[in-house]
Amino acid sequence: MRILHTSDWHLGRSFHRESLLEGQAAFIDHLIETVRAERVDVVVVSGDVYDRALPPVDAVALCGDALRRLMGTGARTVLISGNHDSARRLGFGADLIDAAGVHLRTDPSRAWEPVLVDDVAFYGIPYLEPELVRGPWELPDRSHTAALSHAMAHIRADAPRHRHSVVLAHAFVTGGEASDSERDISVGGVAHVPLSAFEGVDYVALGHLHGRQRMSETVRYSGSPLAYSFSEVNQKKGSWLVTLGSMEVDFVPAPVPRPIGRLRGLLEDLLTSSAYDDVEDHWLQVILTDPIRPKSAMDRLRARFPHTLALSFEPSGGAPVSQPARLSGRPEAEVALDFIREVRGEPAGPDEEDLLRQAIEAARVKETMA
């Protein structure tokens, strides 16, 4: 059996205010072509189908088109909800859609009910918000490790009844490398789960981290199909093609609608050097090192590099230029605690920090239930 492992589509997301929908549509075209060319039996999408709980209508239309076209290939599709998705909305009509060969798994209580394809069991563990499952599952503590371990214990009990077992999960596994574009999922300051939590199955298709990663021979992140932050400049985007039985795993690169890049140097050098000819059509993050901030720097850069999206200044040999604090990719609690420190002139106390983290987690739970 051949499986195509993808995740983190984040349909509806923008990149520094630039729409990515056209690039996401190109990825869907590539996905359909790959399924046909490689004779894929099952496509697995490991969460964060949408970028937010209430996605824009054009993103919903693109998702519907993708699932319809996947169904037309004859392949089965298994999707789970991620921390960006509304599990209730994504899972609407799941039982009816099952009949079409598209299997939406967004209900935690069904994580150990497999989707069976030729006696291969696919277990979809949606993103598990510990606060929501702790009570019903009588977990020993409110943590991602406790929640995932509970689901995996049920799966390990059922998996031996089937020829092969595949798990889809949306989590931050210890040792994984994050980028600036993932949303923080910390509970009590802890976001990670151990790799050992996923032992006992043939393959684990992970989502959440946006760079492709091999946590072990049988546990992998596919990463996102497009770059969603400049921290992903060196990442190769695509999907894993997995052949069960022989356990051959090949990476299938995705199309790049517009490359991203980072430039650093003096403004005049950047504007005149032929060394930068190859990146003139890239989305760019530029750091200028001029001792004195140049006038109209962004306008001058865009005359040569029209897709410059981010500009900052780090002068060499002079007084450092105050830069706005980086917000993207940082945990919400860290940003809020920095704000308190800046406004008050002293850090929040332990009780205040705990209260703040509880409030942020409560807001995330509310969004998950939307």
Image: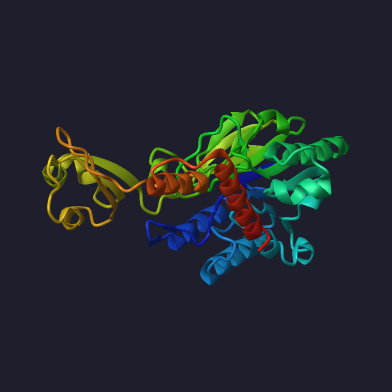
Residue pictured at 35% horizontal, 48% vertical = 259
Task: Judge left or right: residue 252 versus residue 247.
Answer: left
Image mark count: 0
Identify the image quadrant of the N terminus. top right
Question: Is 24 positioned to the left or the right of 286 in the image?
Answer: right
x then y, percent, for residue 5: 62, 44
User: Left of 117 or right of it: where is 215?
Assistant: left
Q: Tell me residue 214's x, y (percent).
A: 57, 31
Question: Quadrant of residue 232 in the image?
Answer: top left
Q: Looking at the image, which is closer to me, 314 or 233?
A: 314
Q: Position of residue 295 (x, y in %)?
A: 12, 54
Q: Give the residue drawn at x 16%, y 44%.
A: 270
The residue depicted at 17 percent of the width and 34 percent of the height is 316
Residue 7 seen in the current view: no
Question: Residue 106 versus residue 360: which sits nearer the camera?
Answer: 360
The x, y position of residue 314, in whole percent, is 22, 40
Q: Is residue 91 left or right of residue 162?
A: left
Q: Is residue 197 above or below residue 14?
A: above
Residue 336 visible in the displayed image: yes
Q: Nearer the viewer, residue 291 or 175?
A: 291
Query: Which residue is more in the foreground, 344 or 71?
Result: 344
